[in-house]
Image (cartoon, rainbow, N blue to C red):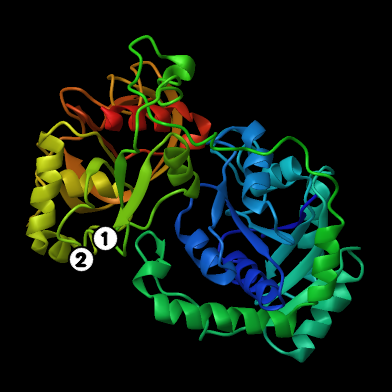
């Protein structure tokens, strides 16, 4: 049984990240082992969570992975910890568009049987806060709203009015935070600036958040509330036993992604799979590296901003999401690495690229030369592309066989022209039907972010291909 809290809010901008990160850091500073989690597909907040706790920030997404995997993935991440803090997404009852509660904070809280602490932006209200909290606490009887933290409180008098009003709601006030500006993190076109781009400042910000939460919240009451959570349903997710990789079987199609690949075989050694990181490529789910390692790979990170060569013995390459558009001049200036990536792709080595990786593999990004692996050009756009997607693999690739169904997420302000190659990666079914991405030799490049825990055969298939 893991003590746990879900930090929710009536709407985005209420202060969930402030409170959740501050709580994580405050509990960690008190000597507790804290497991950090984030509802939804967001990659940036988990970076701050990891900084606050010293453990990987992990996502819990009932759309990408399915409701049945939420509790097992949580148990995997929280193993051995004293308390887990789960930061919600958007407003508490906001989920996948048009699909009811699916993937909302409330949905995940119910799947985890976790008490919810509601963070309320109190800056422009007093007695009305009681009606707001009452509405959220009573909307779904299966969601246990067990406490409130008041954020952006203006004064002692303001706090007293808020507390007096909330006495009638039956939901206890567990904290009150004053309006401050010096602990906020800078933001840009896709949200907060990631930790990897401002680590020294981020360390100071997280320390300030911890102090703010410690001074303004009842940590003992919050810990007691977390410990009141009942036994966790479901088992514990595992990436699988570490194994020697084997070439993918032609008939292998369990779950649609080549599930047999990498599961058996006596091949000596482990293929080196280079995984892009650093400030330009910060988007990655922790489970992906765990799945690759469990399938028999040696996972080696590298930084395309600074490393001029791929890791020694690289047999495969994974380039996740991030902000290459911010670092286009620096990425372009690292010509030795761009040539090494292009040569690796030409050699037939497996390459998997998501979003930022797609841009990096293009001919150019905003006029700056990139790797030139794909016959496509990328540029910044005024239009934000955002949302969950139902997808089906259009072409056989190093990740999946044609017909494999996946759920993914798009989040970018860039455009790649053309948007798909002669052999597209995915067919998308919402909000409009279209094909997207590129499959070329052993390269799979796409805007679509996927969570491989939903289909572990992807990692096994990829490692199996790398082993050949």
Please report the residue visible at 62 percent of the width from the left and 65 percent of the height from the top. 16
- Give the camera-side residue of 144 and 195: 195
305 sits left or right of 57 in the view: left
- Quarter of the view holding residue 400: top left
Q: Which residue is at the far bottom?
A: 156
Q: Which residue is mark 1?
A: 303
Q: Which mark is residue 306?
A: 2
Looking at the picture, how far across and down is residue 435, in whole percent? 28, 26
Q: Are marks 1 and 2 in contact (CB under 8 Å)?
A: yes
Please report the residue visible at 41 percent of the width from the left and 81 percent of the height from the top. 200
Q: Is residue 253 above or below residue 364?
A: above
Q: Is residue 271 above or below residue 125?
A: above
Real-space CA distance between mark 1 and mark 2, rounded to the nearest whole angstrom: 6 Å
Looking at the picture, how far across and down is residue 465, in whole percent? 29, 27
Label 2: how many Cα within 10 Å (few below 14, some 14–19, many 20+): few
Looking at the picture, how far across and down is residue 220, in whole percent? 83, 74
Q: Quadrant of the C terminus?
A: top left
For the question of whether residue 430 can be seen, the reply is: no
Q: Which residue is at the far top?
A: 251
Circle 2 sits in a helix, a strand or a loop, which is it?
loop
């Amino acid at each position: 049984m893991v003590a746990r809290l879900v930090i929710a809010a009536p709407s985005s901008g209420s202060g969930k990240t402030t409170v959740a990160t501050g709580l994580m850091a405050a509990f960690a500073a008190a000597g507790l082992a804290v497991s950090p989690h984030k509802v939804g597909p967001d990659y940036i907040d988990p970076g701050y969570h990891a900084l606050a706790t010293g453990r990987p920030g992990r996502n819990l997404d009932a759309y990408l992975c399915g409701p049945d995997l939420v509790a097992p993935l949580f148990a995997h991440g929280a193993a051995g910890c004293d308390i887990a803090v789960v930061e919600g997404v958007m407003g508490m009852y906001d989920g996948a568009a048009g699909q009811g509660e699916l993937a909302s904070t409330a949905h995940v809280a119910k799947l985890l049987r976790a008490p919810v602490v509601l963070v309320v932006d109190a800056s422009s209200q007093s007695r009305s806060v009681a009606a707001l909290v009452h509405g959220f606490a009573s909307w779904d009887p299966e969601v246990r709203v067990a406490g409130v933290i008041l954020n952006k409180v203006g004064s002692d008098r303001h706090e007293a009015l808020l507390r007096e009003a909330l006495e009638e709601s039956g939901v206890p006030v567990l904290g009150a935070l004053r309006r401050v500006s010096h602990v906020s993190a800078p933001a840009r076109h896709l949200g907060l600036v990631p930790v990897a781009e401002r680590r020294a400042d981020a360390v100071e910000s997280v320390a300030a958040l911890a102090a703010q939460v410690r001074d303004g919240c009842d940590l003992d009451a919050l810990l007691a509330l977390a410990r009141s959570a009942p036994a966790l349903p479901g088992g514990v997710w595992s990436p699988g036993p570490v194994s020697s990789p084997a070439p993918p079987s032609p008939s292998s199609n369990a779950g649609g992604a080549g599930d047999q690949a990498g599961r058996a075989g006596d091949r000596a050694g482990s293929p080196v799979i280079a995984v892009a990181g650093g400030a330009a490529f910060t988007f990655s789910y922790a489970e992906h590296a765990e799945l690759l390692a469990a399938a028999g790979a040696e996972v080696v990170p590298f930084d395309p901003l600074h490393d001029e060569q791929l890791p020694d013995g690289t047999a495969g390459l994974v380039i996740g999401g991030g902000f290459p558009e911010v670092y286009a001049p620096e990425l372009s200036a690292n010509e030795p690495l761009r040539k090494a990536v292009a040569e690796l792709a030409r050699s037939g080595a497996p390459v998997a690229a998501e979003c930022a990786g797609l841009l990096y593999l293009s001919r150019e990004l905003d006029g700056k030369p990139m790797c030139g692996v794909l016959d496509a050009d990328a540029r910044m756009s005024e239009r934000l592309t955002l949302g969950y997607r139902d997808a089906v693999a259009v072409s056989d690739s190093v990740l999946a066989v044609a017909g494999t169904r996946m759920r993914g997420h798009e989040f970018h302000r860039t455009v790649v022209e053309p948007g798909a190659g002669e052999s597209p990666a995915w067919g998308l079914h919402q909000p409009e039907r279209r094909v997207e991405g590129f499959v070329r030799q052993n390269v799979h490049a796409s805007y679509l972010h996927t969570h491989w825990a939903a289909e572990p055969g992807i990692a096994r298939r990829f490692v199996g291909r790398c082993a050949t």
